[in-house]
Image (cartoon, rainbow, N blue to C red):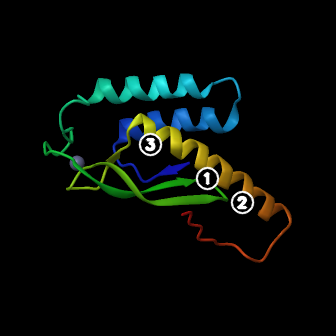
Amino acid sequence: MAWTLKSSVRECEQATIWSKVMQSSTLSKKDLIAATWLKLSSMESLKAIPQCGQHRVSKEWRQTTFEYKDSEISVQVPKVYAWVCPMDGEASFTPETVDELITTVRDFIEAAKRTRNRQSTLREYIISVG
Ligand SMILES: [Zn+2]
């Protein structure tokens, strides 16, 4: 699994959570939100503007692209609001956003798997809603 999030610690933790979500049905969405919330709030105060621990600068609330990637399927979700480090683009997503991303990305992974299984020659899609 590869991630656009650049912090090594966070990357590792997020990847762990995501692989559990993708592979197991034992972890409920509620558990996941709680776990994500704890991780985020332990790393930075959610009441203040979060700082990048590596660059010692304030992160900016702006749009970024979330990317999920495994060996065969990648899903990109552009224009997602997150706290973003201006130096290296490392993004911290809020728990609410993580919740939405999980639901959305799961749906598209299922769709992509169906497409792969029928060996469609169409390999790339851009989908927008609303
Ligand atoms: Zn940074």
Number of numbered markers: 3
Q: What residue did someone put label 3 on?
A: 97
Write the residue at 59% across / 29% down.
29
Q: Rate crowding at label 3 as few (under 14), some (14 to 19) or many (20 or more) other CA atoms within 10 Å.
A: some
Name the residue tied to disc 1.
70
For the C terminus, the quadrant is: bottom right
Q: Which of the two labelled residues, at mark 1 and mark 2, occupies the earlier sequence position?
A: 1
The residue identified by callout 2 is 112
Any atom of ligand 1 within 8 Å of the CB at mark 1? no
Residue 41 in percent (x, y) is at 31, 26
Q: Amino acid at mark 2?
A: Ala
Q: Is residue 47 left or right of residue 32?
A: left
Q: Closer to the camera: disc 1 or disc 2?
A: 2
CB at disc 3 and ligand 1 closer than 8 Å:
no
Marks 1/3: CA–CA distance: 21 Å
Q: Do the residues bearing badges 2 and 3 touch, measured as CB atoms within 8 Å?
A: no
Front residue of 1/14: it is: 14
Under tag 1, what secondary structure? loop
Q: Give whichever of discs 1 and 3 has the lower sequence position.
A: 1
| Residue beneath the point at 18% across and 38% down | 49
